[in-house]
Amino acid sequence: MFKGNVTTAPFKEHLIIDMSLTEPGEFDIYCFDQEQPVNFIQSGKFSLQQYCQCLLRKLFSLNKSKIKPFIQYQCEQLADPFVWLNKFEKLIDLNRELFTTKEQNIKIEKALVVIELIRQDIENNKFNKSARFDFDKVKSKLKQYTTPEEQLSYLYESQAEYLQNKPKLLDPTETPFDEKITIEIEKIERLEQLKKRTAQRTAIMNGKSTKEKIAIRGHLNILVDAFYQMLHEKKANGLPYIDATASEITDFIVNNFVDKDGHPISESTVRTMLSPNKPEKRPKNDNKINL
C-alpha cells in the first residue's frame, strides 16, 4: 500500500483489537499482516511502528464518508483525544511522500479537516467523550465517601459495572480499569488492616486484652478451599453445607486467622479464592483438603 516505510509519530495512546481474543468492528484498528503479532507486542513492547502502519491502512481502507465516524470512534475511547489527534496529524505530515494516489490524498485531506473540527469541539467543550470508565474520575469521586465501607462499596459497584459492560477496545499498554480498581481496593483494605494492628498494639501496651488470631502454617488457599467446598460443593439436604455468604466467610477468615508470620490476611485475596470463576486460585487435587 505504501512505497516506503512508515515514519512513526509518538502516540501515547493506541487502542487496538487483538483478533485472537475478539472480532474487530468496522472502525477498529487491528493487525493487517499475518506475519505480525495480533496483539502488537514485539520483543515485550508495544510496536508503535505496527500501530502507525495499521492506523494509516485502516484510514485508506474506509470510504470517504466513513472517515469522520472512524476518527470520532477512536476519540470516544481515548483518555486524551486531543493529544491523539495531534499525533495523528503529525503521522500524516511525516509520511506525505508515501501518499502517491489521488484517492489517498483525498482521504488525507478529509482526515485533516475532521481532526481540526474535533479539536475545536474539544477546546470548546462540545466533544462528548465517553468517560464511563475513567479511573481518574473514580479517584476523584472516591474522596466524597468518608468511610472505608462506603469507598469499598463504590469501588465494587464500579468494578462490577465495568466487567458487565467491558469495552471491546483496550489499550494493551495501559493497566485495565478493573485491575486499577482492584489495586485501589487492596490499598484501602491494607490501610484498614494497618489501623487495626496499630489499635491492637496500643491496646496491648495499655494492658487491655485483645483477640488472639489463629496462625495458618500452610498455604492460605488450602484453608479457603475448605470453606469453598462447604459453600459450593458439599450439600446438606440439597443446601450448601455451611449457612453463610461468601462475604461472611471472607470476614470470618480475615478476622480469625493470620499467616504463618502473624501478618493479617488480605480480604480481596480471600474473596478471589472463594469466587467460582477463579479455580486457578484454589489448590490442586493433590494439595487440597477433601471434605
Image (cartoon, rainbow, N blue to C red):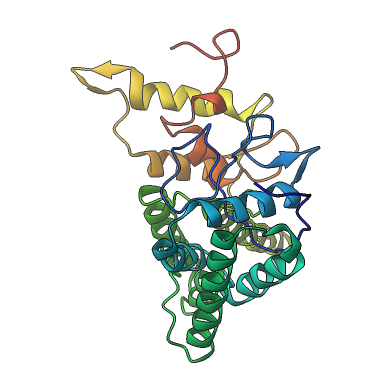
User: What is the quadrant of residue 215 in the picture?
Assistant: top right
Residue 9, can we see it?
no
Q: Nearer the viewer, residue 161 or 280?
A: 161
Percent x, y of residue 109: 56, 73
Picture quarter with the C terminus: top left
User: In the image, is residue 201 above or below residue 252?
Assistant: below
User: In the image, is residue 192 above or below residue 54?
Assistant: below
What is the residue that sits farthest to the front in this orientation?
102
Q: Nearer the viewer, residue 115 or 23?
A: 115
Percent x, y of residue 179: 57, 51
Q: Does residue 53 appear left or right of residue 111 in this picture?
A: right
User: In the image, is residue 162 above or below residue 23?
Assistant: below
Residue 215, can we see it?
yes
What is the residue that sits farthest to the bottom in this orientation?
124
Q: Does residue 264 appear left or right of residue 111 in this picture?
A: right
Percent x, y of residue 53: 67, 50
User: What is the quadrant of residue 207 in the picture?
Assistant: bottom right
Q: Does residue 26 appear left or right of residue 86 in this picture?
A: left
Residue shown at 49% from the left, 25% from the top: 279
Q: Nearer the viewer, residue 285 or 216?
A: 285
Residue shown at 75% from the left, 50% from the top: 49
